Image (cartoon, rainbow, N blue to C red):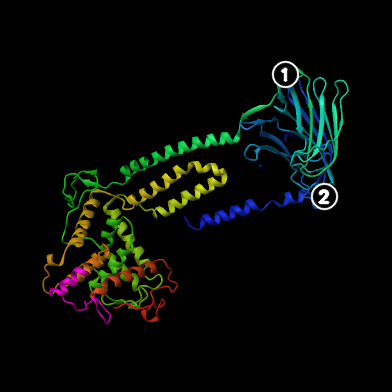
């Protein structure tokens, strides 16, 4: 032989991998105490430079041994000079056993990393060997084993190598064409100058070497020089240094990665053009629907400015919210709850202990409102705490499902994006990159430009696709919703004409909540109160004891936060709880009602 879909999943994988790589296998530790009682090796150099090898090994097991045979490591690559490596082309060894032991062989090539590689020959019968010792005979050939310089060829070989067991007695026979010159033998560490016993050949016979008591990992190196013309070929097989090859391959990988990384955004843009753009009716103005049974023609269209509409669309709040976002959203549920209060179906109370009190279930304005009302009071209670764990979870899912069903029935979307957002996709890509890094090593970092491009493009693509792609009908209805949102976002108090008895604040408050315009709408209505056009008295839907218009945005924001928290926690009580039982801890501080 001549002579190394979650954020916590990635850290957990890293720890597990470290444990698996850091803890050595128990059989290898136990088997380290075995020793080679006798090692007899015959090298025959042919006239073509090929070396035929026969190894006879007697292995004695220690008391703590696993008694599972032998590992033999044969060097197949090593550095030759700064620019090149030398290859040793070794045939698969043929293994027999003079002692009659089973000889199941597993051969693993190209073991190790960098410029030094090995072939591992694992002789393992698959069961415990009962005898105290076992004998094996390995035969194989080596090409490229001869060294060459200006004076001719020579053969120098590390018989045991740095991975061999301790050896009690070793004998090496070396036969070359013609007479061997300058025979030498060294034992000990790889740089050792300790000579071992050498019996020079007479005439053209073999040269013999002997050594004893070699510790595990110590080398036994033999060498001779050949007469000029004794062999024809068989010199060293030299290839590009593994480090240089890896560096060159890395640069190629980096260039390919950068090129693919530049193409990924183009592919993302093309995918968005095919899947992300809304369609519009080609023969109708914005927001207009064709008569029943008439075809107005549809075509993909770029985004265009939407006008202003002063009246709410004839849609439920859940439907309008779905058209805007393409996804279920907590504001749809909060707005529906506010709508129930405005319609007189319930009364709301804010503060540290909010509650929803049932008044008249018949006043629910539409099916989503009725569904939410049914879910809130399905336990028979007439007062519930909307912030209690799980109280609104099922209701939110039901009205979201109802709106999605309407969208499918009315064909509002060509494609509705149902992904969970970019976070899961980014974690998946990063997790895959981490696994590749573990398998390939630092060279996988050359693919970083492609990875970054995939992550960024995927994030942008999901952000753009989150609203879905609408049909002509869906786009026309969305135009109506967006145009009313534009009006509500831009109207000033002096532009509003409030008729006597019209509580415009309450009437449009659910839409302000849906559009996230609560604060602005409250400020506009506060100006109406100040000018005397709107009453400052508590609205009928308010069930608290102290009313303040200026506190409404904070109350709505807190209610939305409560709904969000309530929908993410299970309801272990089996139904909505009474507000009087206090289903959640008191807040620090108070809020005016």
For the residue pair 523 and 125, the one nearer the viewer reads as: 523
Q: Is residue 395 above or below residue 185?
A: below
Residue 333 covered by magenta stretch: no
Q: Earlier in the sequence, mark 1 or mark 2?
A: 2
* Residue nearer the viewer, 231 or 343: 231
**Residue at the image point whose x is 42% and y is 48% from the top:** 455
Instruction: Please identify, in this view, whether the residue under mark 1 or under mark 2 is nearer the observer.
Output: 1
Give me the residue at 82% from left, 33% from top. Answer: 185
Mark 1 → mark 2, Cα distance in angstroms: 46 Å
In which quadrant of the rendered image does the C terminus lie? bottom left
The furthest residue to the top = 229
**Dot 2: what SS?**
loop
The question of residue 539 being in magenta is answered with yes
Asked if 232 appears above or below 258 in the picture, the reply is above
As displayed, is residue 513 above or below residue 3? below
Magenta extent = 523-548
Dividing the picture into quarters, in which one does residue 552 lie? bottom left
Q: Nearer the viewer, residue 525 or 476?
A: 525
Q: How many marks?
A: 2
Q: Quadrant of residue 119?
A: top right
- Residue 463 visible, this angle: yes
Image coordinates for residue 251, horizontal then vertical, percent: 50, 36
Q: Visible in this render: residue 345?
A: no
* Main secondary structure of the magenta stretch: loop
Q: Which mark is residue 62?
A: 2
The reply, left or right, for residue 538 in relation to residue 237 is left
Q: Is residue 334 left or right of residue 165?
A: left
Residue matched to label 1: 232
Across and down, in percent, residue 258 comes to: 43, 39
Question: Residue 418, how many percent across, how many down?
Answer: 37, 53
Q: Is residue 288 above or below residue 149?
A: below
């Amino acid at each position: 032989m001549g002579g190394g879909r979650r954020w916590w999943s990635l850290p957990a994988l890293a720890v597990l991998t470290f444990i698996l790589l850091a803890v050595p296998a128990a059989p290898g530790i136990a088997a380290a105490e075995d020793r080679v009682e006798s090692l007899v090796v015959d090298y025959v150099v042919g006239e073509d430079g090929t070396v035929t090898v026969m190894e006879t090994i007697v292995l004695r097991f220690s008391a703590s041994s696993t008694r599972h045979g032998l590992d033999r490591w044969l060097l197949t690559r090593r550095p030759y000079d700064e620019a090149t490596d030398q290859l040793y082309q070794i045939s698969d060894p043929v293994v027999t056993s003079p002692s009659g032991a089973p000889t199941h062989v597993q051969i693993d090539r190209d073991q190790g990393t960098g410029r030094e590689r090995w072939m591992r020959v694992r002789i393992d019968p698959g069961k415990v060997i009962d005898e105290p010792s076992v004998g094996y005979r390995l035969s194989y050939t080596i090409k490229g084993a001869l060294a060459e310089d200006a004076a001719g060829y020579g053969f120098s070989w590390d018989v045991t190598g740095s991975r061999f067991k301790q050896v009690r007695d070793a004998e090496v026979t070396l036969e070359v064409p013609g007479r061997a010159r300058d025979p030498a033998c060294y034992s000990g560490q790889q740089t050792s100058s300790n000579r071992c016993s050498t019996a020079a050949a007479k005439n053209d016979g073999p040269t013999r070497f002997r050594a004893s008591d070699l510790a595990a990992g110590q080398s036994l190196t033999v060498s001779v020089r050949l007469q000029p013309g004794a062999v024809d070929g068989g010199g060293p097989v030299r290839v590009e240094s593994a480090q240089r090859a890896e560096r060159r391959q890395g640069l190629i990988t980096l260039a390919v990665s950068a090129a693919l990384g530049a193409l990924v955004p183009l592919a993302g843009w093309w995918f968005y053009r095919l899947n992300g753009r809304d369609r519009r009716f080609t023969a109708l103005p914005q927001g207009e629907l064709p008569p029943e049974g008439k075809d107005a023609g549809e075509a993909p269209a770029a985004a265009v400015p939407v006008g202003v509409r002063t009246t709410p669309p004839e849609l439920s709040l859940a439907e309008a919210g779905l058209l805007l976002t393409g996804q279920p959203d907590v504001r749809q549920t909060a707005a529906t709850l506010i709508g129930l209060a405005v319609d007189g179906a319930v009364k709301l109370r804010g503060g540290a202990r909010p509650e929803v009190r049932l008044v008249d279930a018949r006043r629910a304005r539409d099916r989503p409102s009725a569904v939410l009302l049914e879910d809130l009071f399905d336990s028979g209670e007439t007062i519930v705490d909307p912030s209690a764990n799980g109280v609104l979870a099922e209701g939110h899912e039901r009205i979201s499902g109802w709106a999605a069903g309407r969208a499918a029935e009315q064909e509002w979307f060509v494609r509705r994006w149902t992904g969970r957002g970019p976070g899961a996709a980014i974690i998946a890509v990063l997790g895959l990159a981490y696994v590749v890094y573990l398998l390939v090593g630092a060279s996988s970092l050359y693919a970083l430009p492609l990875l970054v491009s995939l992550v960024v493009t995927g994030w942008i693509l999901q952000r753009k696709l989150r609203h879905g792609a609408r049909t002509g009908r869906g786009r026309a209805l969305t135009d109506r919703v967006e145009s009313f949102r534009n009006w509500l976002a831009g109207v000033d108090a002096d532009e509003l004409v409030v008729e006597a008895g019209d509580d415009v604040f309450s009437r449009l408050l659910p839409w302000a909540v849906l559009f996230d315009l609560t604060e602005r709408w409250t400020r506009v209505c506060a100006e109406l109160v100040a000018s005397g056009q709107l009453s400052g008295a508590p609205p009928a839907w308010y069930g608290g004891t102290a009313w303040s218009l200026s506190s409404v945005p904070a109350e709505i924001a807190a209610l939305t936060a409560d709904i969000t928290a309530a929908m993410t926690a299970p309801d272990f009580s089996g139904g909505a709880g009474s507000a009087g039982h206090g289903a959640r801890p008191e807040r620090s501080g108070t809020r005016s009602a």
